Amino acid sequence: MPRRGRKIRLVECSIPFAAEPMLFSFSANPLQRLVALRWIEILMISAALFFVGGYLQLKLPFAALWGIVFVLIVLNVASLGRLSTLGEPGSRELLLQLALDLIALAGLLYFTGGSVNPFVSLLLLPLTIGAMLLSPIDIGLLTLVAFAAYALLIFFNVPLPPPSENLAGFDEYLLTLTGVAKGHEAHLSGHGFGLHILGMLLNFVLSALLITLFVSRMAQALRRRDALLAATREQALRHEQVLALGTLAAGAAHQMGTPLTTLAVVLHELRLAHAGEKELEADLALMENQVNNCKNILSEMLSTAGQERRESGALVTLSELVTHCLDQWQLLRPAARCSLLAVPAEKCSSSPPQLFANRTLEQAILNLLDNAADASPSGIEVRYTWTAAHCLIEIDDNGPGIDAVLAEGLGKTFIRSDKGGLGIGLFLSNATIERFGGKVELLPRESGGTHTRITLPAVDSSAIRPLKEETQ
């Protein structure tokens, strides 16, 4: 392949994963999640105060209540500043943050009826968050703070004012509707007990929604993490298989050197002995050429094996990669028929991108070309195109096709087919292309045969940060 780009020995790169909500991400900063939850808490409290003061027109100590909301806002702004300057917080810092949240909620409840407030169970919210973020000792301390707050609210509180005007009538209607007022009209009517029951209902609905939201999203986050771990384990097993094959291949390459050299010498002597026989001489020349190709491949594999591990490869264009692979493949299989169909650049969504390529990637593509040609002796078609983020190479054959169930396992493990193959070539090609951040897909064609799609990530050359370079 033409090595026109820079050789990159080490390249800083990152693998993008599906975005995970910050509140439920295992990689998010715990204080960052706490700040996000506190903003939600501030919005809900503010909305409740506006509703109670503006619509229900209850006479509450709003100055003190809004003061507590202001303290929460100051705490959150200070926490944001803490996030931008320092690292991840310790368990004790999180304990202090949650204790302040719990005390703020207790203060709001103190001015709104104390323990008889139907929303008193919101004191459990900081405990729920603490159970996810704190150590066992710290969550025990936070639980003691919650116990103390609830106990103090029983004895120390500002009673809720009785309902007036329309609310008093609504309170009596709720008492009658629920059946609580029967036999107790004298001491329940006019004390807001019906409104208390309604508040308990709203509190239950709110608690159920919060539990459903948090538990379900946390469960989804756990399932995503388990799936990622399973995929990582599967990839590690594939890498172990590739390493084992590489070790066997290296030993086989050394052992094949002597027989190939012997064949080359014998074929050369036969050509000299039958110099006058044109047809036989042509056949012997072809055989000698193929043996020399085998020797060159083994020599190149042994001489570059160590270097390919250290280098990520060269930056090349997609057309250079495809053209070079087809040239190499036609030398190895001169009788095979192949049509190259390049998509015009004006039909693509961006200018031609570059990608990383080296000998291992070339060999992976050659293996896929061999599979297609073996399945379709009449010829194959190769196309390439690109988007802003990906390079696509597509190989179409007219063979018998691949069973859908078998296609799912091909490239992921060794699978014995009806023709006796183990799928090693496709397994190695898939592993190599995955190492470059790409993937291989085998899809059935409507007209018969198999459509092989190779997807490789395009490289933004301006974003490359080489740690070591050498210019050729």
Image: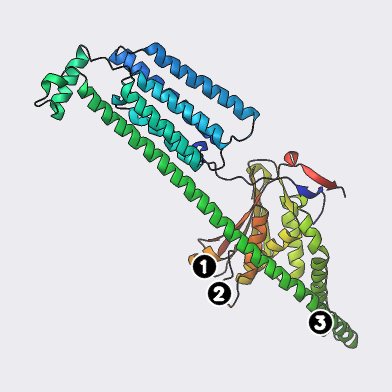
- Indicate how the structure is coloured in the image: rainbow
Tell me the amino acid under the disc marked 1: Leu
Q: What element carries label 3?
A: helix
Residue 219 at x, y = what percent? Answer: 44, 46
Q: Nearer the viewer, residue 21 or 282?
A: 21
Give whichever of discs 2 and 1 has the lower sequence position. 1
Q: Mark 1 points at which residue?
A: 406
For the residue marked with disc 2, what is the amino acid?
Ser
Kindly identify the amino acid type of the residue bearing the numbered disc 3.
Pro
Quarter of the image for residue 81 reads: top right
- Label of residue 18 in the image: none
Q: Are marks 1 and 3 in contact (CB under 8 Å)?
A: no
Instruction: Compute the Cα span from label 2 to label 1.
Output: 9 Å
Q: What element carries label 2?
A: loop
- Give the camera-side residue of 449 and 187: 187
Q: Residue 417's mark?
A: 2
Marks 3 and 2, how far apart at CA:
30 Å
Q: Position of residue 332 (x, y in %)?
A: 75, 70
Residue 406 percent location from the top left of the image: 52, 67
Q: Can residue 414 be seen in this view?
A: yes
Kindly check if marks 2 and 1 are in contact, taking CB atoms under 8 A apart as contact: yes
Q: In which quarter of the image is residue 69?
A: top left
Does the image show residue 448?
no
Q: What element carries label 1?
A: helix
Say above or below: 367 vs 467: below
Q: Which of 393 and 189 is in front in this view?
A: 189
Tell me the number on the disc at residue 259.
3
Dot placed on the residue nearer the N-terminal end, 3 or 2:
3
